Image (cartoon, rainbow, N blue to C red):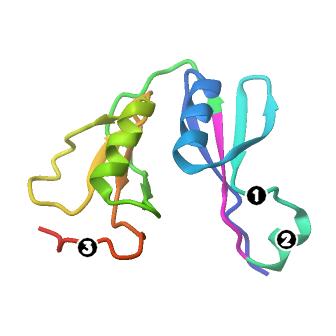
């Protein structure tokens, strides 16, 4: 048997704030809370479902005392499902994200952003029907 990818854990100062941002960004819901942590997901994980096959991982935000000091070594990519990448980036900006430059250079088909605590993520190709996807670079 193999292991399953079940959670992605994000260290942060304010788990409630980041959980609220990512719930709004992704359409997720809070599925669990404990002291200093919040877990969100698009589904309610069960042992049976996870054992049956790989399911989408949950996001767990855990309070830590130290701050972010460098570019993330791991980041999320999100794809809009009903609009283009620029319109989705504008929506995420209104939720508290920022645009960031991590050296990606001009002319990319994705948009690099950061959540309210500075964790980088990319808005990549749109999955909306009929939306033109420009070529990279």
Q: Tell me which label, 1 or 2, sits earlier in the chain.
A: 1
User: Looking at the rendering, in which quadrant would you find the C terminus?
Assistant: bottom left
Which labelled disc corresponds to residue 17? none
The residue at which mark 2 appears reads as 49
Q: Is residue 59 magenta?
A: yes
Q: Which residues are magenta?
A: 54-61
Q: Tell me which label, 1 or 3, sits earlier in the chain.
A: 1
Q: Quadrant of residue 100?
A: top left
**Does 16 appear above or below 40?**
above
Mark 1–mark 2 distance (CA, rounded to whole Å): 11 Å
**Does 99 appear above or below 76?**
above
Q: Quadrant of residue 49?
A: bottom right
Query: Is disc 1 placed on a helix, strand or loop?
Result: loop
Which labelled disc corresponds to residue 132? 3
The residue at which mark 1 appears reads as 43
- Residue 72 location (% of width, % of height): 38, 43
- Residue 48 location (% of width, % of height): 91, 70
**Does 18 appear above or below 103?**
above
Q: Are marks 1 and 2 in contact (CB under 8 Å)?
A: yes
Could you tell me which residue is drawn at 34 percent across and 61 percent down?
124
Mark 1–mark 3 distance (CA, rounded to whole Å): 30 Å
Query: Is disc 2 placed on a helix, strand or loop?
Result: helix
Could you tell me which residue is drawn at 40 percent across and 40 percent down?
92
- Residue 112 location (% of width, % of height): 28, 48
């Amino acid at each position: 048997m193999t292991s399953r990818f079940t959670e992605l854990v994000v260290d942060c100062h304010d788990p409630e704030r980041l959980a609220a941002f990512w719930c709004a960004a992704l359409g997720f819901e809070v599925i669990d809370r404990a002291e200093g942590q919040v877990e969100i997901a698009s589904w309610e994980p069960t042992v049976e479902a996870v054992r049956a096959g790989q399911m989408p991982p949950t996001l767990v935000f855990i309070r830590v005392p130290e701050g972010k000091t460098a570019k993330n070594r791991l980041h999320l990519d999100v794809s809009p499902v009903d609009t283009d990448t620029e319109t989705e980036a504008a929506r995420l900006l209104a939720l508290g994200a920022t645009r960031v430059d991590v050296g990606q250079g001009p002319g990319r088909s994705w948009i690099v952003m950061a959540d309210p605590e500075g964790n980088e993520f990319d808005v990549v190709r749109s999955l909306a029907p009929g939306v033109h996807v420009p070529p990279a670079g």
